[in-house]
Amino acid sequence: MSGRTTAPTPPDGAVPPVRHPDAPAPGETIGSHYEYCFGCGPGVPHGLHVEVRAGDGVCVSAEFRVKEAHQGAPGLAHGGVLATALDETLGSLGWMLRVIAVTGRLETDFLLPVPVDTVLHLHAEVTAVHGRKIYAAATGRIGGPEGPLALRAEAVFVEVKVDHFIEHGRPAEIQATLANPDQVKVARAFEVNP
Ligand SMILES: CCCCCCCCCCCCCCCC(=O)SCCNC(=O)CCNC(=O)[C@H](O)C(C)(C)COP(=O)(O)OP(=O)(O)OC[C@H]1O[C@@H](n2cnc3c(N)ncnc32)[C@H](O)[C@@H]1OP(=O)(O)O
């Protein structure tokens, strides 16, 4: 046994997160990190188009309207789509720390069914950091930012460098991305992280 755990509970030695001085200002919209991201990309017609805003701590808020294309049961959102909305919101926390991080583990509680056309109000915050691991929690509420709790999640993200995507991504999309100066600017901004 290596003693390694992927549990979403911060281990001994984890430290509180620190908001990066160059993080987006509270209330500022965090734009899509990639045009064809299923979670936030404007170039995906049936995507979630989650729009995230920076919070005043190491946290973010977002909204997501459930569309017909997101159904699992008649008139209800698919659980995987709801988990994607949480994942996307949690993934945006990297902007608050100025690191790129990918989801290692995502545990989700589904507390209420979410009908089509509902606006899901999402909130995510970093709870602790341990080496490259970022511990975070998220909620999804319906009927308003203070409305009933429909979703709850705990997650571990793992910090990576841009090379993670270059190494693992399909060459056609990587080449197209690297040829887009705006996209490269977004990616490289994270690597200047004193
Ligand atoms: C040119 C292109 C520009 C593109 C610019 C894009 C920019 C912005 C993109 C943002 C995108 C966000 C979008 C939404 C969020 C997703 O949806 S991300 C997509 C879904 N996630 C993935 O694809 C991740 C797949 N997994 C992996 O690639 C690898 O397993 C990982 C997670 C990177 C870890 O591998 P590794 O780097 O070899 O890590 P390793 O050294 O084994 O472990 C490091 C530590 O992490 C822990 N760990 C490893 N795996 C896990 C795990 N699954 N769970 C918990 N802990 C773990 C280890 O226990 C270890 O802890 P310590 O021993 O240090 O205490």
Image (spheres, rainbow, N blue to C red):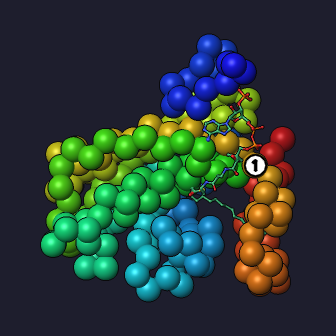
In this picture, residue 190 sits left or right of residue 75: right
48 and 72: which is toward the camera: 72
132 and 124: which is toward the camera: 132
- Residue 175 placement: quadrant: bottom right
In this picture, residue 141 sits left or right of residue 14: left
44 and 16: which is toward the camera: 44
Mark 1 vs ligand 1: CB below 8 Å? yes
The percent coordinates of residue 104 (x first, y second) are 60, 44
Quadrant housing the C terminus: top right
Q: Secondary structure at mark 1?
A: strand
In this picture, residue 92 sits left or right of residue 133: left
The percent coordinates of residue 48 (x first, y second) are 41, 71
Asked whether the viewer can see residue 27, the reply is no
Residue identifier under label 1: 160
Q: Say above or below: 115 vs 94.
A: below
Q: Residues within 10 Å of mark 1 (few under 14, many from 20)?
A: some
Residue at (61, 26) in percent of width and height:
5
Asked whether the viewer can see residue 86, the reply is yes
Residue at (55, 54) in percent of width and height:
92
Farthest-out residue, front: 1
In this picture, residue 29 sits left or right of residue 183: left
Tag 1: amino acid? Val
The percent coordinates of residue 14 (x first, y second) are 63, 21
